[in-house]
Structures are given as structure tokens and as C-alpha cells.
Amino acid sequence: MTLLHEPTGRRTVSSSDMGTPRVPGEPTVDVEIDGVAVSVPAGTSIMRAAAEAGIDVPKLCATDSLKSFGSCRVCLVEIEGRPGAPASCTTPVMPGMKVATTSPKVDKLRQGVVELYLSDHPVGSCPEGACELHDMAETVGLTDVRYGQEGHNHLNIEVDASNPYFSFDPKACIVCSRCVRACDEIQGTFALTVEGRGFESLISASGTSFMESECVSCGACVQACPTTALQEKSVIELGLPTRTVKTTCAYCGVGCAFDAEMRGDELVRMTPSKEGGANEGHSCVKGRFAWGYATHRERVTAPMVREKITDEWRVVSWDEAIAFTARRFSELQQQYGPDSIGGITSSRCTNEEVFVVQKMVRAAFGNNNVDTCARVCHSPTGYGLKQTFGTSAGTQDFKSVEDADVILLIGANPTDAHPVFASRMKQRLREGAQLVVVDPRRIDLVRTPHIEAAHHLPLLPGTNVAMVNALAHVVVTEGLVDRDFVAARCDDESFAAWEAFIARPENSPEAMESATGVAASEIRAAARLYATAPNAAIYYGLGVTEHSQGSTMVMGMANLAMATGNIGRVGVGVNPLRGQNNVQGSCDMGSFPHEFSGYRHVSDDTVRVIFEDAWGCEMRAEPGLRIPNMFDAAVAGTFRGLFVQGEDVAQSDPNVTHVTAALKALDLLVVQDLFINETAKLAHVFLPGTSFLEKDGTFTNAERRTNRVRPVMEPKTGKDEWQVACDIATAMGYPMGYDEASQIMDEIARVTPTFAGVSFAHLDEAGSLQGPCNDAAPEGTPIMHVDEFVRGKGNFVPTPYVPTDEKANRKFPLLLTTGRILSQYNVGAQTRRTANIEWHPEDLLEIHEADAAERGISDGDWVAVNSRVGETHLRARITDRVPQGVVYTTFHYPESGANVVTTENSDWATNCPEYKVTAVQIRPANAVDPHRVGAGA
Amino acid sequence: MSAVDLVRMVNQIAVNQTHLPDDEAAAMVAQHLTMFWAPAMQRDLLAAVDAGDADLNEVALRAVRQLEPA
Ligand code: SF4
Ligand code: SF4
Ligand code: FES
């Protein structure tokens, strides 16, 4: 048999593959490989040492993202003074070792191994450069295979094409187990196994198809596969990519770095970048595969206007759309005053796009009526962390979790919402770190392969503050306070006041038991575990912030971390898991109505001068309206015009009946987006936006890491998004313009001390930079508050528990809470336009068996969900994940209308909506009622 | 803006300061309103109080009295 193709160069992926993982430490072991001297840390494999010396040892089962395995025997070497030919991937270096990676003996052995593999490998199946087995044949000098394929082989096994994004062809599989190990070691899902023994061995998705298995479609197996056995369907369809552009995922706040791999102008695949600080080569199903929405047929790429929202859209030129928008905004200000209009920025957009929109509002609109969608997710983080630590930022980098001994996970579901960070967390948990989960629902991390939480505290929705107070009470009353840390780093007076407050009997776990519904003994045990760990870290999500006491809870967690000395070093901290890709950035950029970029209050004269000098116009010293205030003012008739950047408030904001009434009351609603979403249906102007594949700019992730977003194609709309805001401002009489996005970042750096050291050039050189990045920290700040807090001394704030007004009662006896699922993203505008719908075609209402039985509801039945503000219909899923008395749903489909039932309740400090607690009643519904009702029943 | 919404919000801010003596709590609430509420909201709240339309709790009422008419 002649080989498929004349072997050519290796794939770029494998040529940068060092074979086995880096071993941390100083290079203390001197060895000689093929006569080249090299020093490496103790424990390094010969294969890696060789790679460090610039010598590639042939390999198949080894790759540097996985522990060495030693199954293929292609990497054999000879070691002076030792018999045999050991595998270089599993043999560690020893001082003075002399290694030969080629010799007649090992060359022959290798040829024999590769020849055997090829005898059971389909001829003609692997495109050139796609298969490391063929590459190895070239490397080991094999041009012909002596054995035919008539013998016992695997060449008749069916392809598994069940996954929408990749297929598995067992014929091309060499059973190297790289996929199995990637699933285990990197992703932590353990969905794949090797079934059978010896020649009968086959890779199996645990006995079923990939789609029906536990596989989460992260793609780590596909990336790890050295052959074409596991391959992206896009590569099969379009061919191998020919060039790459480095960019950043536009979905969640993990901010994974990717190589967008292109063939001409067509995107072929997204490969997570090994150099990505947040993801280090891993990704989830959304970032790797769910990018097809960017070219979806429903995408609108031309501007449109209409006089009334009942009129048909009229496609117009950019010039007309800009002139129409500017004229109408100006007219409204003349008629109703300067404060009658405002704008909302989007955490999906780049820092540069957000910055120009808030500048448009402050400079061209002349008011501070700018807010961001972070209002409805992490605004309590901003308030709470600023009060206690002095700045609105998570304290750690993601890598820090590798040093945590106890992880306190509160109101977050990372395996679904922050999957790549969850994989890191799971790696640490498998190494032995302990986990405490505080969540009404039994999220996957409570029990998942090889992981079991030490404590799951399934508190009732709305009782977070009761819980954190009870935990802190145990710390204070059982002598678990880190007195040295508190004395050295925190404000004495505030600590004394807090200590006295938290020690009160009403804060004890026993007293709080009736509120939280969690046994006091469990709370005490969890508190002791957290407080006595060498390193204990808090990670939290929207299950903390989206409550009437969201800000109080953030301060409660900060108090707990300070009291136990768990701040200011690796492995500890208070870490918000931000929902959207650029929540941190949009907040940093001055999107809040009371703050300029860098979290500086508009009333600060010295700060206003900076902006007045930079922008050449007067800045207002009073806060503007927040999003919910804008809606209230619109209903009241004082707020008349709104610019909405990349956000679907009519689906994502609570009590959509009220939101819709507010939007309908506006004289001018301008929406900049990819699709005609629920909000755009009520708009007068639609300005087409750009997808992340067309953007040039930066995103800042949950660990304050600013990453570059680079365009892989020209804007399909003919205009960059930042240009649109500049054009509107200019047409309104405030000239605003930049030649390119990098100039916007330069301006951000000039007016924002925490970004002073950031520029596109610096980012291109460093890869990414964690803020603050300035003269004091020229290469950024992975860990915050190391020697002192941003505010100087850490400030303790007493956190009285105030039960929410949203209580279960006879009429609405169940508490509804909400969350996200892995395959879908927020309101689903992107993911619903990809094959990800195959995993989640509809939102479901999770309900406990007893609650369902009481109402005569069976699994899969349609049910009506009523709250005091509205009614919606969903299909029921009976589960023991939720406790009795609690129901749960996701909110990815507009039809399911989760926010038809959520109420106007909000966080006392920030007006962040209380999405996580809605008192509801459920009843069977005979059929789907597409007409949701906007009045309490 | 509607007095009902404003009153609900300011009362809620006040009940979250129960760890403080009333005078400090009122000062805290007043400061919060100045820092985070648009002048129009403060104005509408004052107007509602003046019109006798505001069912404020004790701390909230004391806080509102400290607001400068915007
Ligand atoms: S599918 Fe690929 S990675 Fe998995 S065992 Fe087969 S060849 Fe190796
Ligand atoms: S974890 Fe988040 S940032 Fe990373 S690939 Fe998935 S969605 Fe994108
Ligand atoms: S690469 Fe070393 S045994 Fe496979």
C-alpha cells in the first residue's frame, strides 16, 4: 500500500506542541540531547527537554496539554548507559543524562510501529496536513506499508455524525486515548472511554452516540485528536484553514482567547489559544462552535427607520439614518429638555464601542443618562466591592483557583455559565480542594464525576444575607477571625462595629435556620471549613447580585473574606463570575450614570476637569437615570428618547409588560443590534451592528484581563459600530471622530488611571493585560489588594438581613428562580441561531415531584406560571434538583417569557432587578398559549 | 416619576440601614440619594412629600428632609 499523499510539512498545531506539560520550577537538571545541552526543571520528560532544545521527538499519544500516557511507542529514544529504548514522553530527565533521539535501532522500531498503525488506517481519508499519523510516517521515513488491509481491521465501523459540529470516524482512530484524556483531564466530564481490549479497543461515548452521551461538546477531544477520527464538520466541508487571526470569544465573562482559523475570507474553525491567559487552550461549545449566527440569514445589515412603530421599516442609507436619529434626539431635547434622552451601553460590545456611546451621551446629549446592562447583573458587585475594598473588581486571576484549598461557590453555576473556568475549578477539586455550594438548586458541581461538594447549603431564594451572616457569625464567635490580618490590613473601627453586629444572636445559624431553611449544623461546619483552610476563595454569580439585597450580600462576602484573611494573595479572594464577555469592561468604561471611566463619581470636581479638558465641553456633576429609572420616567412622560446598544431590554429586563409600556411611550427608540430583537420591534431606528468577527477592539473579562478582539472580516454593515455613535454625536453638533479603534483606547488610557498603560500595541505585545495597568503596574495586576486595599484599609460594613417583599403566600406559594444552561446564552439571540438549539430547543420549568403531584402535573406537561405581574406558559420538568417550594427556569427563548412574571423589585442600593425571587403559582395548562398575559391573575 | 416607585425605593434604602442609629441612618440615606439618584428623581420625591403623597418610614422621611431642593 502506498501512502495517501507524499508527506509534506507538519501541521502548525503539532509543531508548537512540546509533547508533555511544562513542569514548574527552576531549570536545575542539565542533560544532553543529540549533543545539545539543555537545562530543565526536575520532573520534565525527555520529550519536553528535547523540544526545549529544539528537537522534535516523533510522537502520537503525547501532546503538551495532557499528562503523558506512553501507549503508542513512537517516541522511543536511547539513553547512554541504559538498556532498551524507553518512551521519551514518560521518562523523566536525570542529571547528566545523554539521550539519542535517533539511531538505527529506534528508527527501525518507530517505523515498525507507524507501519502497523497505517495498516489499519483508511487510505485516502486524511486531507494533507490533517493527520499526525501521516506526518509521523514522513518523520520516521516510511514511504510504503507492507501489509494490506485485508486482515482483521476496523475499516467497516460506522461514522458517528450525531453531534452537529464534529464527527467521529472510528476507522481513522488509532486509540491513542488523547480524546479520552482531554475529556477527563481538561474538561472534567469523563464522557469518553476506551471499550474492549487490545485490537478490539474502541473509543466510545460511554456506549452511545456522542449526542446522546454526557459529552458537553467542548471540542477538547477534537482538538486533541492527532488523526481525522474526530474532526470538525466545518473542516470536512470547507477544507483545512490556511491562516489564523487571534481574537477573543464574545460570549461569557471567561473571555477565552481563540485562533480564528480562516480559509480565504471564510471562517473554518475556532481553536482555543494555548497562550490565552483565561483559557490556556480550552473552550466550551459556545465559543468553539456557536459562531454561525454572525452570518445567519436573519441578520440585518442595512440601517432602517420608520416614523411610527406601526409603520413598515424603510431601508435607508447610513447618512439618512444618522441624520434622522440626530435630528429627532435634538428635537426631543428642545421640546422636553436636555435630560429627556439617554443611552444604554452593552456588555457584548468592545470597550471602545462602549466608551464612545457613553461619551456621546455625556458630551453630545449633555447629560449623565447613560447606563449599561451590567445594571441588571453585576451592579451590586460594583457597589459592594467599592464600599469594602475600594474598587469594583474581582480580586484574582482565574489561575488562582489552582491554589485554593476550599472553594465557597455562591449563586453561580459555572459548569453551565462559565464552563472553561469550571473546568479549571474541577481540576483543582479533583486534586483534593473542598467545595461548599450555596444554591437553592442542586447544580452539577454538587455531585459530578470524581467531585462531591463537602457541603451543599440549599437555601431558600432570597436568603443569601441570612446565610452569609450566619457563616460570619460562626467565624466571629468561634474564634476563627484572622486577627493579624484584620489588625494589619483593615480599618479597626469598622471591624469593631461589624464584629459586634455579626456576633448578635439573631445572626447565628440557629436563628437564621428558619429563614434559610438550612440546618444550622451544616452552616457551622461549612463556616469552619472555609475559615480554617490555608487558602479559601469565594466565587459567586448572579445568584448573589440579582436580589433585593444584592449589594448587601456582596459586602457580606467581602466581610467574610477579610475577617478570615482570605484576600491579597494567590488562592483566595472574592470573585464575581461576570455573565457577559465585557461586563467588567463596560463598567470600567464609565457606563454608569454616576461614574466616569475608572469608577470616579461625577460629582468629583477634579475628575470632571479631566473630561472637560479632554472633550472640550462641560460635564454634569449630578448622576443621571439608571435603566429602571429611565423606564419609569418614560412611563411618566419625562423621558422621551433612548439609544440602546446591543441589548434586548424587552426580553432581558424584569416585568417586561412594564418595560414594553415604557418603550412604547418613547418618541424615539434607536436600537443598534445584529437582529430585530424584541426591543427592536418597538424601535423607530434600527442601526445594524457588527458581530465580534468584524470588530476591532478589546474585551475585559471577569478577571480584569483585557484581550484584543481582531476582525477576521470587514464589517458586513459597511461601518464600525463606534463610528455610528461618533456620527450621531457629530450630527448633533458635537464633533467626535477617530481614524481607528486604537485611538479610542489611547483616549481611554489618557483619561482613566487604571488603563493608563493599555494600548493596542502593548496588548499585541503582551497578549493580554490585567487591570489596573499603569506606571505602578506596567504589566498589569493579576492579584488585587496584595499589600493594601485600593481604598487603603479594608472596610467592614454591617449587613442586616432584610427579607425581600417578594414572599411566598397562599396565592403564590412557590418561589421561582432563574438561571442559564450551557448550550444557550442569555436571551439566546446568538445561540438560538446556531445548532446549539439541538441541546436546548425550549426553556423548561423545573419543579419538585411533590409540588407537581399536588397540582396534577406530569413531566412534559404545559403549565401556566402566574406571578402578581403576569403569566407565562412553559413545559414542566419534574426533578429533585430543586427543593420543594422552589421552581426554576432558564430564559433563553422569548416565547417562554420568564421576565413576564419577574417583578419590579430590585436591589436597594443599585436597582439591580430581583430576578432570582418571584412568588408564583403553577397550574396545568391544556395547550400552549402563545399569548402571554401581562396582568396578575 | 411615579411617587409610588420613588417611595418604595427610598423606604427600601432606609430599611437596609437598621444597623445604624436613626440619625446616622438618615444621613446615610440622604447621601445615597445624592450620590445615586438623578436630580429629577430627588425633586419628584420632595414634591410627593410636600404634597402629602409619600408614605415614608421614619428614617426615609428624615433623609428626604436633608435633601437640598435640586
Ligand atoms: S479519536 Fe482521535 S484522539 Fe481519540 S483515540 Fe482515536 S485517534 Fe486518539
Ligand atoms: S467559556 Fe465563555 S469565553 Fe470561553 S469559550 Fe465558552 S462562552 Fe466563550
Ligand atoms: S508519544 Fe510517547 S508513547 Fe506515545
Image (spheres, rainbow, N blue to C red):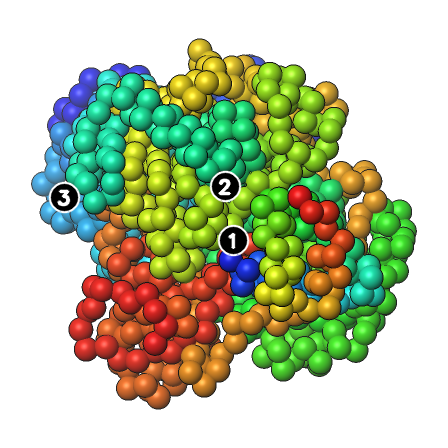
| Residue A564 pos. (x, y %) | 78, 57
Marks 2 and 3 belong to one chain: yes
Specify the amino acid type for callout 1. Answer: Met
Tag 3 residue: A155
Residue A752 located left or right of residue A3 = right
Subunit under mark 1:
B
**Badge 3 element:** loop
The amino acid type of the residue labelled 3 equals Leu
Viewer-nearest of discs 1 and 2: 1
Q: Which residue is mark 2?
A: A372
Question: Chain under label 3?
Answer: A
Q: Is residue A827 left or right of residue A807?
A: left
Reading the image, the residue beneath label 1 is B1
Asked which secondary structure carries label 2, the reply is strand
Contact (Cβ within 8 Å) of mark 1 with mark 3: no
* Residue most extreme to the top: A739
The CA distance from mark 1 to mark 3 is 73 Å
